[in-house]
Amino acid sequence: MAKSRSRKGTPGGASPVDGPAALPGDDADRTVVLPPAGSDPTLGQASAAEASSAAAPEPAAPPAPAERKELVGSLRSKEQQRARDKARGKDKEAGKGGASQPGGLIEWIKSVGAAILLFFVIRTFLITAYSIPSESMEDTLLVGDYLMANNALFGATIPFSDIKLPALRDPRRGEIVVFRPTYNEPQIDVVKRVIGTPGDTLQMTDGVLFRNGSQVAEPYAHYGQGFDEPIDMEGFGLMDPSIRREMYGAQNHLPLLLSTVNPRQYRPSRNNWGPLVVPAGHYWLMGDNRDQSLDSRYMGPIPRRVIRGKPLFIYYSYDKRDLDAAFPRFVTAARWGRIGDRIR
């Protein structure tokens, strides 16, 4: 029968295989559980290792060589794709002057053509620029004034034809108008003032205008010579080759005279003529410079169909007669104070 013996130095006589034993240097609460006698001592070690691994997280495992190669290959593919996309963008930019040049040229031609067409439409049907070449409208308009005129107001004329578009209204007394008379060869645009409209009875006595029996105030009228001169009955002695002689002279007055006037005794002059009646469809136009104007006094009433527009304002002006102006004359001889003036 086995006997138990106390071991020296073992407090309480406990056997090392019967229970836990305190380890030197540990806290009193810390014990090590020993496996029972006859069991595999490595089982305790395995249990301790499993407990340790469960308590601490495992570090991430490095990628395998095959995975690393696949990742590097994917990054390289993306870099190559970005490089190809960038190269395609440069090719497209270069292609604008290369392979796509014919298409770009066609688009450019279309744009230029549309701009030119728009310019002609505006110039023909809406607004046109005119210049003053003579002294007939001084001091209202001067030689070298450049005007912008409204073509739509009195009905624009279709180019290369005598067809006029519908007008917004007809010219009014006192207005300045642009017209293209038929008495000039070649025909040119002329600027005058409306003195009489269809049906008006006009007469001038010593430079004073009477309309329908009433005197007309003309602050714009300019008389510079101080003398009168007769209007020839016909224009056969006319020296100006640009004027059609058969359309010139006081002969234009005769069909318009009142019945109280004897045509055989009618001797009009520049400042004394009438009374006469403006016929239907016509206007009596005169220049503000009464001594230097070839107008209805000499050429008769002007047909409505040749009146083209109403001047609006002066967009540029320079003194063409200032030959001593320094270069460039269009700057040094410019009348800056007249630019932008409304025309009345």
Image (cartoon, rainbow, N blue to C red):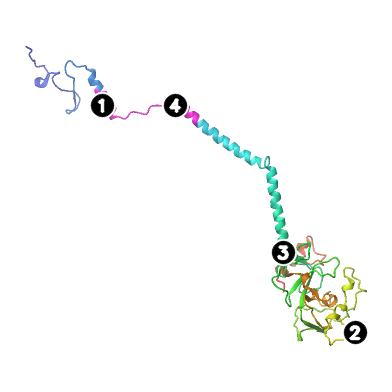
The answer to which of marks 4 and 1 sits earlier in the sequence is 1
In the depicted view, which residue is nearer to us: 283 or 131? 283
Q: Amino acid at mark 1?
A: Ala
Between the residue at mark 4 and the residue at mark 2, the CA separation in whole angstroms equals 123 Å
Q: Position of residue 278 (x, y in %)?
A: 79, 79
* Residue 264, disc: 2
Foreground mark, 3 or 4, reads 3
**Is residue 288 placed above or below 122 in the rendered structure?**
below
Residue under the image location 60 percent in, 39 percent down: 89
Dot 1 or dot 3: first in sequence order is: 1
Q: Which residue is mark 3?
A: 125
> Under tag 4, what secondary structure?
helix
Q: Are marks 1 and 3 in contact (CB under 8 Å)?
A: no
Question: Which residue lies under the disc numbered 1?
Answer: 51
Q: Are marks 2 and 1 in contact (CB under 8 Å)?
A: no
Q: Which mark is residue 270?
A: none
Q: Residue at x 89, y 73 (%)?
A: 246
- The N terminus sits in image quarter: top left
Q: Is residue 6 left or right of residue 227?
A: left
Of the two numbered discs 1 and 3 in the rendering, the one whose residue sits closer to the viewer = 3
**Looking at the image, residue 186 lies above or below residue 269:** above
Residue range of the region highlighted in magenta in the rendering: 47-74
Q: Residue at x 85, y 69 (%)?
A: 184
